[in-house]
């Protein structure tokens, strides 16, 4: 176990190109964009399918279909078709985000006690209000667990961006491997794993904050 | 794509064979290893949360990092397929140990008590009652692990051993779409076939779940 790359202060200088903090930032940038786009696409579809019950087949199978797509292949296909750049990486990572968010949004809404939904209609809520004031808040715990697993997966997978010339923490792995510098590879592996755990903790806190106290029984 | 396939079917077939081996051997080993670990998480409740957290951390290690790092720990050659097998086994165990624990936990305590009352000892009860009842949950986890493994193998291509992933890197280096498409399609088909096989096994092993679904 050679930690020399990880503990060398020179690799933590904020201003040096390719230093660990800079790679963390670019890594988080890809992750955030992919999560944002993926959620913007998948959340409305998942909620709509859960709300109307139409297209459940799609929602149930999206999860497994998405998992079976090899991200590396998709990424290299996109690069071959679109050329190098951020777009192919974002497409590949977004495809990773969509299935868990879509499936969990659907499952969260579907698993609600139908009497609650009936009661909401009974007190005169319009369909839109039922969705935004009842179904969405009550689906949040399930939805957030889907979002967290999507985030974990994207943080780990964003390392492949380095394989097609972009930055992110994958640089440490790919470059370290290219020059047989295992302490750099180890540094990359550790930083990504820590980043994933920290991000999950942050999202767990966010979940406590956004989920209604009445649901989490606190 | 047809021309590519007819000209390169030997390469593609070799890659496919390697892919199947690299993905499925870890599933088998991982399943066998995860069973006792998951059981311990239920037998000793204080172990459950550490177990779940450890599995979560293990699963968050990026596959690429694990692939390149294992040779350092294991002393294997960087190009050895063993690295991929060990890495994917770790992921499988991380996923399944938790599922096994959750599956065993989901067994109705009344069922366990009845089995005990009928004179089942702990291990017999585990094998004859608790495991079969937990099987739907466990096999659901096995499906996820198998499909995830099949898609993860290809990342190994970045370090030179990756089954169908080698078609991706080759196509990428030559800027040639056909091998990449062939690789993606075969990988997805393989995952679908493996998934379906487990579903069929589950139908055979747990006939009562269908019966209940019909009755309810």
Image (cartoon, coloured by chain):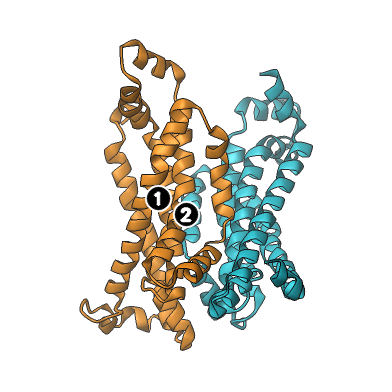
Chain B: give its colour. Answer: cyan
Q: Is residue B66 above or below residue B56?
A: below
Count of numbered circles in the view: 2
Q: Does residue A11 show up?
A: yes
As measured in the structure, the alpha-carbon distance from the residue carrying label 2 to the one carrying label 1 is 7 Å
Q: Which residue is mark 2?
A: A95
Chain A: give its colour. Answer: orange
Residue drawn at (26%, 84%), measured in percent from left and top? Answer: A10
Q: Position of residue B133 (x, y in %)?
A: 69, 34
Q: Which residue is mark 1?
A: A38
| Sequence-wise first label, 2 or 1 | 1
> Is B111 on the left or on the right of A83, as rendered?
right
Q: Position of residue A199 (x, y in %)?
A: 34, 56
Residue drawn at (51%, 76%), measured in percent from left and top? Answer: B69
Between residues B152 and B108, which one lies in front from this camera angle?
B152
For the C terminus of chain B, the quadrant is top right
Q: Position of residue A180 (x, y in %)?
A: 48, 87
Residue drawn at (41%, 14%), measured in percent from left and top? Answer: A118
Residue drawn at (30%, 23%), measured in percent from left and top? Answer: A129
């Amino acid at each position: 176990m050679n930690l020399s790359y990880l503990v060398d202060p020179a690799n933590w200088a904020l201003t040096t190109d390719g230093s660990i903090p800079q790679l963390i930032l670019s890594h988080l940038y890809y992750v955030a964009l992919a999560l944002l786009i993926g959620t913007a696409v998948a959340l409305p579809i998942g909620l709509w399918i859960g709300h109307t019950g139409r297209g459940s087949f799609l929602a149930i199978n999206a999860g497994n279909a998405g998992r079976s797509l090899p991200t590396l292949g998709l990424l290299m296909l996109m690069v071959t078709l679109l050329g190098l750049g951020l777009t192919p990486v974002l497409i590949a990572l977004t495809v990773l985000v969509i299935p868990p968010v879509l499936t969990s949004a659907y499952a969260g809404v579907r698993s609600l006690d139908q009497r609650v939904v009936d009661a909401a209609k009974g007190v005169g809520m319009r369909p839109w209000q039922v969705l935004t004031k009842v179904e969405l808040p009550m689906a949040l715990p399930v939805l957030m667990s889907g979002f967290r697993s999507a985030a974990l997966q994207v943080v780990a997978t964003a390392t492949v961006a380095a394989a097609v010339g972009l930055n992110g923490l994958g640089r440490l792995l790919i470059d370290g491997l290219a020059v047989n510098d295992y302490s750099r590879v180890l540094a990359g592996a550790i930083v990504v794993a820590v980043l994933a755990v920290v991000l999950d903790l942050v999202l767990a806190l966010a979940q406590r904050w956004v989920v209604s106290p009445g649901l989490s029984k606190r | 794509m047809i021309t590519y396939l007819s000209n390169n079917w030997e390469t593609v077939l070799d890659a496919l064979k390697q892919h199947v081996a690299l993905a499925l051997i870890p599933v088998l080993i991982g399943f066998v290893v995860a069973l006792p670990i998951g059981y311990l998480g239920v037998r000793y409740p204080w172990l459950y949360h550490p177990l779940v957290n450890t599995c979560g951390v293990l699963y968050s290690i990026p596959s690429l990092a694990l692939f390149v790092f294992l040779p350092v720990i294991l002393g294997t050659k960087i190009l050895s397929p063993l690295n991929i097998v060990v890495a994917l086994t770790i992921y499988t165990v991380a996923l399944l140990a938790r599922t096994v624990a959750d599956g065993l936990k989901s067994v109705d305590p009344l069922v366990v008590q009845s089995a005990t009352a009928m004179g089942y000892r702990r291990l017999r009860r585990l094998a004859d009652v608790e495991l079969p009842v937990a099987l739907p949950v466990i096999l659901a986890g096995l499906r996820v692990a198998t499909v995830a493994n099949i898609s993860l193998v290809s990342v190994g291509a970045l370090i030179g051993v990756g089954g169908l992933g080698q078609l991706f890197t080759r196509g990428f280096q030559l800027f040639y779409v056909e091998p990449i498409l062939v690789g993606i399609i075969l990988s997805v088909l393989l995952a679908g076939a493996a998934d379906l096989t487990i579903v069929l096994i589950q139908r055979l092993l747990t006939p009562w779940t269908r019966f209940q679904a019909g009755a309810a």
